[in-house]
Amino acid sequence: MSLAATGDVNLRMIDPVDNCRQLLALIAPPRCLFCGLRPHAAAVNTVEGCCPGCRRDLPWNLEACPGCALPSAGAQRCRRCRERPARFDRAWTAFDLAEPVHASLLGLKYRARFADGRVLAQLMAQALRDDGRALPDCLLPVPLHWSRLMRRGYNQAQRITRVLSAELGVPMDESLLRRRRRGRDQIGQSAAARRANLRGVFEARGSLQGRRIALVDDVMTTGATFDELARVCRRAGAVDIEVWAVARTRLA
Ligand SMILES: [Zn+2]
Ligand SMILES: [Zn+2]
C-alpha cells in the first residue's frame, strides 16, 4: 500500500510542522471533557479534550443576531438591535447557555476547573477561525473587582482570553480595563436601571486610540456590562468593538 493510500488525514498528522502537542495528543489523546472517552487517534483537527461526537452535539449558537447574539433566523440583525443598537458594534457567542456547556462554565467559575475553560476557549477559537471573520487587534477580558478577584483567586474571563489570545495569535491586555466598584444585583431591573447602575463601574487605564478590540467574558446575559464597557472603550479611542462570550443566556 502506498503512503498516499493512508489518506490525507494521516499524512497531515506526521507533517513535521505540526507541533509537539499534536504529537502528544496522537500518542495519548486527552479524555473528552464531556463524555470521558478518549477520542480516536484519527480524529485530527479536533479540539483536545473534546471528542468529535460531543463537539457536534454541543449547543452551538449558530443562527444569531450579530447585534445581541440572541437566536435570529438567517442570522439577521433583530428588530430590537435595529431600533436600539448597543454601544458595541457586534456580539458573538459560541454557545447557548445549555448543558453541557453550562456545567463546564460553572466548574470554571466556582471550582477552578481550568481544563474546562481551556477546552471551551479552544472550541471558541476554532469556531471563530472557521467563521473566517476579521480578527481584532487586541483582546480585553471583562475585569473583576479586586475584592472578588481576591476571594476567587482568578478571573474566569481572563482565563478564557489567555487561551483565545494564544490560539488566535491576537495579543491581549489584562490590565487596561479596571473595575472600580462592584456592580449591584442586576436581576429584575429594567434596561435603563441596569445602565444607570453600571455607570462609572469601569475605567480604562490607557489609550485604545484607533484599535479594533474584542471584549471577552464567560457568559453574556443582558449585555449591559458589555454595553457599559463599550462606552468606556469608545471614549478611550477604540474604533471597532466586538463582544465575545463562551455562551449566551436566552433571558434578555
Ligand atoms: Zn465526548
Ligand atoms: Zn439583536
Image (cartoon, helix red, strand yellow):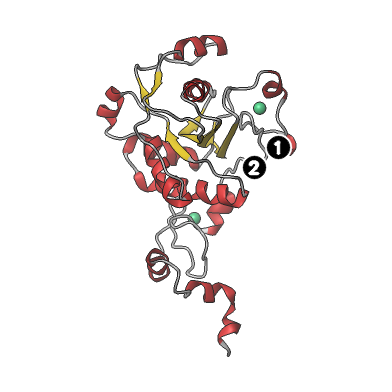
**To which residue does mark 1 refer?**
75
* Image point (64%, 29%), residue name: 67
Q: Position of residue 163 (x, y in %)?
A: 41, 47
* Image point (51%, 48%), residue name: 125
Q: Position of residue 136 (x, y in %)?
A: 52, 41
For the residue pair 219 and 163, the one nearer the viewer reads as 163
* Image point (58%, 33%), residue name: 91
Q: Could you tell me which secondary element the residue under label 1 belongs to?
A: helix
- 140 is higher (above) or lower (below) than 203: below
Q: Do the numbered discs 2 and 1 sit on residues whose CB atoms are within 8 Å?
A: yes
Q: Is residue 83 left or right of residue 188?
A: right
Check the picture and name the quadrant holding the N terminus: bottom right
Which quarter of the picture shows residue 156? top left
Q: Could you tell me which secondary element the residue under label 2 belongs to?
A: loop
Q: Is residue 57 left or right of residue 115?
A: right
- 246 is higher (above) or lower (below) than 2: above
Q: Is residue 161 left or right of residue 54?
A: left
For the residue pair 147 and 172, the one nearer the viewer reads as 172
Task: Please identify, in this view, whether the residue under mark 2 or under mark 1 is nearer the observer.
Answer: 1
| Three-letter amino acid code of the residue under disc 2 | Leu
**To which residue does mark 2 refer?**
62
- Answer few, some or many: residues within 10 Å of disc 2's Cα (few below 14, many 20 plus, some between 14 and 19): some
- Answer few, some or many: residues within 10 Å of disc 1's Cα (few below 14, many 20 plus, some between 14 and 19): some
Q: Position of residue 88 (x, y in %)?
A: 57, 27
Dot placed on the residue nearer the N-terminal end, 2 or 1: 2
| Three-letter amino acid code of the residue under disc 1 | Ala
Which quarter of the picture shows residue 203? top left
Check the picture and name the quadrant holding the C terminus: top right
